[in-house]
Amino acid sequence: MMGEQPGKVHGLAGGIIQTPSPIDHPDAAGEFYWGGVAGTQWWICPKANVAGVMMAQRQMAFVHPFSFEFKRMAYDAVRRGR
């Protein structure tokens, strides 16, 4: 369990970032996301026109060290392409 996550809401289909936290990319407002037990994660951000899927195989790896960097690099690559 990740505990309280201010700025994020969760439902049956996943989570939504309403207000990006300091660990989220600033462009992530409106992002739909979810992750799995072995480090699998997906996200879609229609506002920033970016989506991603990470498929890692790490037991009990809800949050793994490279996930935040990978997502930051994806957002930055889309931003540079504008």
Image (cartoon, rainbow, N blue to C red):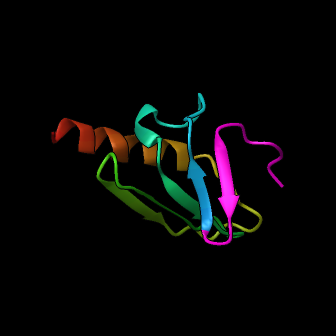
- In which image quadrant can residue 33 be found? bottom right
- In the image, residue 72 above or below residue 1: above
Q: Does the magenta stretch include residue 11?
A: yes
Q: Is residue 39 magenta?
A: no
Name the side, left or right, on which 28 lies relative to 20: left
Name the side, left or right, on which 47 lies relative to 58: left
Task: State the predominant SS element of the stretch in magenta.
Answer: loop
Looking at the image, which residue is at 45% across and 47% down?
A: 71
Q: Give the range drawn in magenta.
A: 1-13
**Quadrant housing the N terminus:** bottom right
Q: Position of residue 64 (x, y in %)?
A: 64, 52
Q: Position of residue 36 (x, y in %)?
A: 66, 69
Looking at the image, which residue is at 15% across and 39% down?
A: 82
Q: Position of residue 7 (x, y in %)?
A: 64, 38
Name the side, left or right, on which 16 lies relative to 70: right
Q: Position of residue 38 (x, y in %)?
A: 68, 70
